Amino acid sequence: MNPLVGIVMGSDSDWPVMEKCAEKLKEFDVPYEARILSAHRTPDAALDYAATAKDRGLRVLIGAAGGAAHLAGVLASKTDLPVLAVPMPSKHLQGLDSLLSMVQMPAGIPVAAFAIGDAGAVNAALFSVAILALDDFGLADKLAAFRARQTEKVLAKTLPGHP
Ligand code: RP5
């Protein structure tokens, strides 16, 4: 099947985190592709990817980057697809730099910024599923079932010595 979600990351060093996003999409059988493209190191290729994404059938883009993390904003500048932004944990500022780079977009070109790291990666996948589920009843059922299972798991948990 043609990919519906494009995961784009600034470096292969982002993959250990973004693999969790890919795994969650797989769990929902959402076809995706994963690419390494950088706003700074491969600007022309990143812009071209975003500009052609919609015509290639993609419905959602996820941009993951660390440090001066302009990737998601750069993708959003060339497409009107929804762009989700996942800040990568960075060496010196633990991802706060990535988060602020992503969340402080100027009015007019939005990206939806998620939590730093693993939680953001997983939630970007779940948010993509929620977007695609708007016109896919099968996927909407899968999302509802996932959330129900998650609720059951939490409610079934007990603490040692506390019945
Ligand atoms: C960003 O710079 C990447 O998204 C990565 O998070 C960070 C460091 O990249 P590498 O130096 O590990 O390639 O562009």
Image (cartoon, helix red, strand yellow):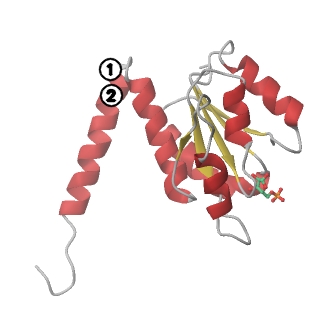
Nearer to me, 29 or 57: 57
Choose top left, top right, bottom left or bottom right for residue 74.
top right
Residue 87 place in picture, x, y as percent: 62, 53
The crowd level at tag 2 (other Cα within 10 Å; few <14, some 14-19, many 20+) is some
Element type at mark 1: helix
Q: Position of residue 159 (x, y in %)?
A: 21, 79
Question: Which residue is located at x 21 percent, y 84 percent?
Answer: 160
Q: Does the closest atom of ligand 1 sit within 8 Å of the Cβ of label 1?
A: no
Q: Residue at x 59, y 23 (%)?
A: 81
Observer-nearest residue: 95 or 130?
95
Name the quadrant of the C terminus: bottom left
Please identify the quadrant where the N terminus is shown: top right
Q: Secondary structure at mark 2?
A: helix
Picture disc at residue 52: none
Quarter containing ligand 1? Answer: bottom right
Image disc number at residue 140: 2
Say which quarter of the image contains residue 79.
top right
Q: Amino acid at mark 1?
A: Phe
User: Residue 20, percent across and down?
Assistant: 56, 52
- Residue visible at 25% across and 58% down in the picture: 153
Residue, disc 1: 137
Question: Residue lying farthest left?
Answer: 163
Instruction: Please say whether residue 127 is visible from this viewpoint.
Output: yes
Q: Are marks 1 and 2 in contact (CB under 8 Å)?
A: yes
How far across and down, in percent of the image, does residue 157 sit?
22, 69
Q: Amino acid at mark 2?
A: Ala
